[in-house]
């Protein structure tokens, strides 16, 4: 019984590591921003494994790193959305970011909380709101 729980825990740990690697590789290929912005990287949710129930727990927060290419103001309001292949909104967020750039925290939609391998390919669209 003890060995079985250890094997299940290792399996879930390996599964979460593979999931994190896949989502970060795929998200880094499909990024879009207008001429004044550059999306550097999309970070997947940081998942943890609960030891008691051996379940994978993922938060509804993702991060996206954005660089601002032109400097007319001290800070900009930047809005980003994450779209699936079918153009459905997976996550959204906005933040005030100073000139060189920073991170925007995206909230994953309630219906899209369980991201599996079928929903990994996504694009991001970011724009500066005047």
Image: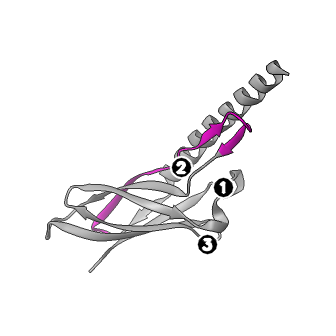
Name the residue furthest right: 1
Vertical relation: 17 (above or below) 121: above
Badge 3 vs badge 2, beta-carbon distance below 8 Å: no
> Can you say which quadrant of the picture contains the C terminus?
bottom left
Measure how far apart labels 1 and 2 are at the Cα level. Answer: 10 Å
Picture quarter containing residue 56?
top right
Q: Which residue is mark 3?
A: 88
Q: Residues within 10 Å of mark 1 (few under 14, many from 20)?
A: some
Disc count in the image? 3
Left of 79 or right of it: where is 97? left
Residue 9: x and y in percent read 72, 29
Picture quarter containing residue 79?
bottom left
- Secondary structure state at the residue bearing disc 2: loop
First in sequence: mark 1 vs mark 2: 2
Q: Residue at x 69, y 52 (%)?
A: 116
Q: Confirm whether residue 117 shows in the render.
A: yes
Left of 15 or right of it: where is 62? left
Which stretch did the figure color magenta? Answer: 35-56
Q: Residue at x 66, y 58 (%)?
A: 119
Q: Residues within 10 Å of mark 2 (few under 14, many from 20)?
A: some
Q: Which residue is mark 2?
A: 45
Is 8 included in the stretch rendered in magenta?
A: no
Measure how far apart labels 1 and 3 are at the Cα level. Answer: 13 Å
- Secondary structure state at the residue bearing disc 1: loop
First in sequence: mark 1 vs mark 3: 3
Q: Confirm whether residue 81 shows in the render.
A: no
Q: Which residue is mark 1?
A: 115
């Amino acid at each position: 019984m003890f060995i079985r729980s250890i094997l299940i825990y290792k399996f879930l740990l390996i599964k979460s590591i593979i999931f994190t690697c896949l989502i970060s590789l795929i998200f880094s290929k499909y990024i879009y921003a207008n001429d004044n912005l550059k999306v550097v990287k999309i970070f997947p949710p940081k998942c943890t494994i609960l030891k008691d129930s051996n379940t994978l727990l993922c938060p509804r927060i993702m991060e996206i790193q954005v660089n601002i290419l032109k400097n007319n103001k001290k800070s900009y309001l930047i809005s980003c959305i994450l779209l699936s292949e079918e153009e459905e909104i997976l996550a959204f967020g906005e933040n005030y970011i100073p000139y060189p750039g920073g991170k925007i925290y995206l909230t994953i939609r309630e219906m899209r909380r369980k991201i599996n391998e079928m929903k990994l390919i996504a694009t991001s669209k970011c724009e500066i709101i005047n």
